[in-house]
Amino acid sequence: MTVPDADRFDIREYGATGNGDDPETDAIQTALDACAEAGGTVYVPSETYVTGPLRVGDDTTLYLSPGATLRFVGDYDTFPTIESRWEGWDQVGFHPCLFVEDAQNVSITGRGTIDGNGAYWWSFYETPMSERPEGLQERLAEFERRNEKGDDVSSFTHRPPLCQIAHSENVTVSGVTLCNSPFWNTHVVYSENVTLHDVTVKNPADAPNGDGIDIDSSQCVRISDTYINAGDDAICIKSGKNAEGRAVGEPASEITVTNCTVESGHGGVVIGSEMSGDVRDVVVSNCTFTDTDRGVRIKTQRDRGGVVEDLRFDTILMRRVACPFVINGYYFTPLDSDPQPITEGTPMVRNVSFRSITARNVETAGFLAGLPEQHFEGISFADVRIDATRDLDATELDPAMADGYEQRHGLFCTSIEDVAFRDVQIQTADGPAMRFEETDDVRIDGLVAETEGAPAVSLHDVTRTRLRGCCAPSDGAFLRANGSDTRTISMTGCHGSMADAVVVDPDSDATVERS
């Protein structure tokens, strides 16, 4: 990008020196304010500038030259208290490092670096409250008082995000590197028409709450050609938590993610768990996920309410992930919990499509769990290849977040209505390739499964199962069914001795139909 001479606000002309030692907040903020008043470009030359928190206003391009760094100070006193949203609730916390609020027509661009100096903030994360600086204890007590949500601030989740775009429109972030965020790296909340293109997002693996990009109750958001290496969720889509999120009612919608590379972290693309204001109309395509705990993860729980619907994941390559596909209605709750009455707090996930995806060297093929009182609906897979032969090291997983990993290797599905598989290949180290429990309508077309001494498909209390274009194995069972609620198994266009390869256990009255 060539910075024009006209309407150019060079921070050196406002007193910034770039010595890399002394805070130069006043000089940089003065240049930003002048630019917001007149419109134009704030120019950051190729030096390191230490600064306190900054605000970017209307009609402003913040341009960081190659080699330029904005490094934020490690001093909680420098960060005032503001109202914003933290983890799904509107509440007060520390001012973001770089804040675009109530602004239009903003661009943050160039080949420079925005460094949140997160290590300063992370050092307090696991420090007992009594050992934190007295002034910090007072600030956190203030947050707890003002938020009136009964939340425990001792976990210190109210740290500053590195870059927050809030209540804004027509904002572009491109070219820059965003690293070492105190909290979430880039947070887009209550905003519209936001583009993140050709951005590098980096946080260390041990950065607490070190999400890469969080899209929160925002519409028309595009993320493209971006590299993310974060210790937590890479790209996360949210819309508020529980009753407050439903009352605010601002969905995350019309979101596209394409041509992105994710390395490391808890998940490649994650929906939730704060999704109470609805998430809909999301397309993720042409991406690679490597060494993430999960690939695509949709997580929710009772009391969230809200609807996640109309999501498409297309042309994705995954390698060395623990589980490539997760839809979990039991986030932080036991999988075997009893059914509950359906209320406004009962969440729904429906119309989710996975297409043209390859996952190699993974541990568990998939985990899909709706709720017994409200089955999730319309989950489909087409042209999917999964190599689930990697050994699972359970010691590496937080049991509260394991998403049912005890169902290791094969794909596990429960409490789903209408789940379909077409041209799917699954290779597992042990157990069935697919296991279904308490599911209403299963359609399998052209499954190719490689298993060790187990049927390709296991059914327990599945109302209707339809097989098409499947091949019987040379020996053993292709499908085993049990459970008193397993009813109809129909086969069309299957090959080999499929009649002998479908086994119905004595505890089931299932009927087998062939055509």
Image: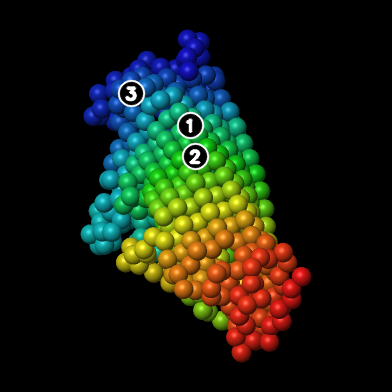
Instruction: Tell me what residue is drawn at x 37 percent, y 41 percent.
Output: 202
Q: CA distance from mark 2 to mark 3?
A: 24 Å
Does residue 167 sit above or below 35 in this rendering? below
Look at mark 3 in the image and give the residue it sits on.
Answer: 67
Q: Are marks 2 and 3 in contact (CB under 8 Å)?
A: no
In this view, the residue in front, 218 or 139, is: 218
User: Which three-letter amino acid code belongs to the residue tagged 2?
Assistant: Cys
Q: Is residue 60 left or right of residue 21?
A: right
Of label 1 and label 2, which has the lower sequence position? Answer: 1
Picture residue at 66% right of the left edge, 81% below the top = 486
Circle 2 sits on which residue? Answer: 260
Image coordinates for residue 365, horizontal then vertical, percent: 49, 61
Give how far apart the Cα atoms at labels 3 and 1 are. Answer: 17 Å
| 26 or 239: nearer the viewer | 239
Kindly check if marks 3 and 1 are in contact, taking CB atoms under 8 A apart as contact: no
Number of marks present in the image shown: 3
> Residue lying furthest top in this view?
5
What residue appears at the point 40 percent right and 33 percent down from the top-left corner? 177
Q: Along the polypeptide, which appears first: circle 3 or circle 1?
A: 3
Q: Picture coordinates of residue 441 (x, y %)?
A: 69, 70
- Quadrant containing the C terminus in the rendered view: bottom right
**Amino acid carrying mark 1 in the image:** Asp
State whether residue 170 is above or below residue 261.
above
Q: Is residue 258 visible?
A: yes
Q: Which residue is mark 1?
A: 198
Precedes in sequence: disc 2 or disc 3: 3
Outermost residue on the right side: it is: 515
> Could you give the CA–CA distance between mark 1 and mark 2, rounded to whole angstroms?
9 Å
